[in-house]
Image (tube, rainbow, N blue to C red):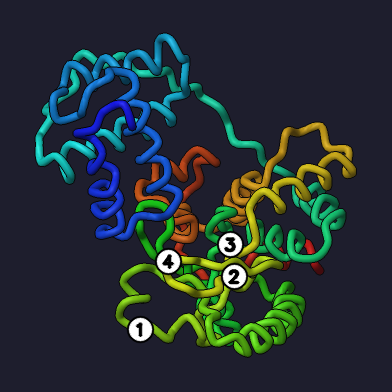
Amino acid sequence: MSEHPEARHLLPELHRAIRLRHYSRKTEEAYVRWVRRFVRFHGRHPATLGLDEVTEFLTHLAVRRRVSASTQNQALHALLFLYREVLRHDLGKLDGLVRAKRPTRLPVVLTPEEVRVVLGELSGTPRLVAWLLYGAGLRLQEALSLRVKDVEFAHHRIVVRGAKGGRNRVTTLPIGVIQDLQAHLGSVEQQFRKDLQRPEFHVPLPDALAGKYPNAGRYWVWQWVFPATRTYWVAQTRRVHRHHFHASAVQRAFHEAVRRAQLTKRATCHSLRHSFATHLLEQGYDIRTVQELLGHRDVRTTMIYTHVLNRPGLGVRSPADAILE
């Protein structure tokens, strides 16, 4: 956006508006990226553009760039946020927008035996993360963003905070993974004690919490369950941080595990979450219960797995425990 001097202050305002509403870091990066592309496409400041230009850009993405429906939808939300929250301008209805086609794809679901084989090919942190994706129905980023306080061993549950859409939820902690997870946290705590020897060490916290509790980043309960192996220096705050384990490392390990297991399905880490939902429904759990565990806002999203008769909810037993017997 350097070719537009008057737009120079737009991005900082966009960053502030997003952080004020506590959106995730990934959402912030995506919104900023789409605003940049929108400005480059039209060559003008967004304040001088309106509904017609937004419609033209989004239609271009669908027709010329052939982006997916989810990608176009993300760009739409980014621009709506820009105009509504930063520029204070209501665009109105985008009646002339050409929507990208949303393919009707069924999720890739593994059988319990396939899950057992693939997870048996994993080791270390990727293995533990994968067990939580399947055993608790977590998204990959949700598992990696877990803090120590979010895992409640006594109640066999995991609290997922700031999930998709900024919502919190509670899901089941598989009993069969507790021993390994506790051993893992023992090693994490040893590393944390070493980190504390550096006065400048603080684990990254959400902006509001960092301001309200400036020393919370040095408390054990706020540490990542799956921390990265390296720390990094932040010049602005003059602090040393340790981020959580990177998603790409888990994805690479899972891809190799699928290859070694010789599966014919194009399974990804997210297939474990699909398998969690499907196996619970096969066990007879109420679809509303599965909806709550997955954190779906609309039950129609959960219905993609299967249609079942509603039954009274029982205490949920993780499908991971069934294959560990």
* Residue 323, placed above or below residue 272: below
The numbered dot on residue 96 is: none
Q: Earlier in the sequence, mark 4 or mark 1?
A: 1
Residue at image location 17% in from the left, 45% down from the top: 85
The residue that mark 4 highlights is 236
Name which residue type carries label 3.
Ala
Where disc 3 sits, the SS reads helix
Which residue matches tag 3? 143
What mark, if any, has residue 213 been given in the picture?
1
**Secondary structure type for disc 4:** loop
Q: CA distance from mark 3 to mark 4?
A: 28 Å
Secondary structure found at label 2: loop
Instruction: Indicate the position of residue 297 as horizontal and vertical percent values.
Output: 35, 50
For label 2, the residue is: 242
**Marks 3 and 4, the one that precedes in the sequence:** 3
Q: Earlier in the sequence, mark 1 or mark 3?
A: 3
What is the crowding at mark 2: few (fewer than 14 residues within 10 Å), some, or many (at least 20)? Answer: many
Q: Nearer the viewer, residue 288 or 239?
A: 239
Task: Give the x, y percent position of residue 47.
Answer: 14, 30
Viewer-proximal residue, 33 or 144? 33
For the residue marked with disc 1, what is the amino acid?
Tyr
Contact? badges 4 and 1 (CB < 8 Å): no
Q: Of the residues shown, which amino acid type is indicated by label 4?
A: Gln
Label pair 3/4, CB-CB below 8 angstroms: no
State which mark lies toward you, 3 or 4: 4
Foreground label between 3 and 2: 2
The amino acid pointed to by label 2 is Arg
In front of the other: 184 or 243? 243
| Residue appearing at x 36%, y 52% in the figure | 165
Q: Residue at x 58, y 62 (%)?
A: 143
Q: CA distance from mark 2 to mark 4?
A: 16 Å
* Placement of the N terminus among the 4 image quadrants: top left
